[in-house]
Amino acid sequence: MKLGALAEALLAAYGPQGWWPLLAHAGSNPTLTGRLTGYHPNDFTFPRTDPQCFEICCGAILTQNTAWTNVERALFALDRQALLAPGAVLAASDRTLEATIRSSGYFRAKARKLRAFSEFYRALGRRAPSREELLAVWGIGPETADSIRLYAYQQTEMVIDAYTMHVLCRHGYCRPPLDYARAKRYCEKHLPRSFESYQEFHALMVEHAKRLRAAGG
């Protein structure tokens, strides 16, 4: 089965995913995994506001090396403390910021990453950052940069994560060991090129990988 056909089969099986989930959005979770609300299946118009854009960027940073449930707790805490804005992140003390995002793990390093990104975000203005600009920000690696470009700025940038790599190898599309750049090139070569298709594919791969692992596959 070609990769595009797999994407279509997963969409038929699981339905549209509606990523990236947002705190204030009332959409329900269309899948068996992930948070309960915040999704927007078949609506690719998000983010619609600057706060939503910044929230997605923060989520992409906080989700490094942890489960989304931990990130969600940190985002809710930031929101409750009125810290989910670049100026507020920069004005907060180290102790306050670290305590607020503690649930995401590696909270001292992630607090520093949020500060570095907040400075970059304020200087950037409203334009979409290039991948190279994001990778130059302290603490931003390829997966985080691509997530920010794809979901926060609606740029046609394929996101590869451990779930995607697992599915690609599990179904024989690529042979392990598989690195990020090779997996990214492969997916971009074999899928329709649009930010909508890339968002849906990435989300479906995560859902499929979670189900495979739950079934022992």
Image (tube, rainbow, N blue to C red):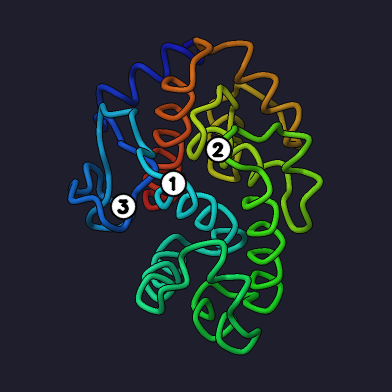
Q: Position of residue 214 (x, y in %)?
A: 38, 53
- Which element carries disc 2, helix, strand or loop? loop
Q: Position of residue 97 (x, y in %)?
A: 57, 80
Q: CA distance from mark 1 to mark 2?
A: 8 Å
Q: Residues within 10 Å of mark 1 (few under 14, many from 20)?
A: few
In depth, the one of 82 and 21 nearer the eye is: 82
Q: Which residue is mark 1?
A: 50
Identify the amino acid type marked 3. Answer: Thr
Which residue: 65% across, 69% down? 110
Identify the amino acid type marked 1. Answer: Asp
- Which element carries disc 1, helix, strand or loop? helix
| Relative horizontal placement of residue 195, taking residue 184 as reference (left or right) | left
> Is the residue under label 3 in contact with that under label 1 (CB below 8 Å)?
no
> Is the residue under label 2 in contact with that under label 3 (CB below 8 Å)?
no
Q: Is residue 162 above or below residue 90?
A: above
Which residue: 41% across, 43% down? 212
- Which element carries disc 3, helix, strand or loop? loop
Q: Position of residue 22 (x, y in %)?
A: 33, 51
Q: Is residue 116 above or below residue 25?
A: below
Q: Tell me where residue 158 sits by quadrant.
A: top right
Precedes in sequence: disc 1 or disc 3: 3
Q: Tell me where residue 63 sits by quadrant.
A: bottom right
Q: Is residue 155 above or below residue 71?
A: above
In depth, the one of 93 and 37 nearer the eye is: 93
Foreground: disc 3 or disc 2: 2
Q: Which residue is mark 2?
A: 126
Foreground: disc 1 or disc 3: 1
In depth, the one of 81 and 11 nearer the eye is: 81
Q: Which residue is mark 3?
A: 33
In the image, farthest residue toward the bottom: 95
> Is the residue under label 2 in contact with that under label 1 (CB below 8 Å)?
yes
Q: CA distance from mark 1 to mark 3?
A: 27 Å
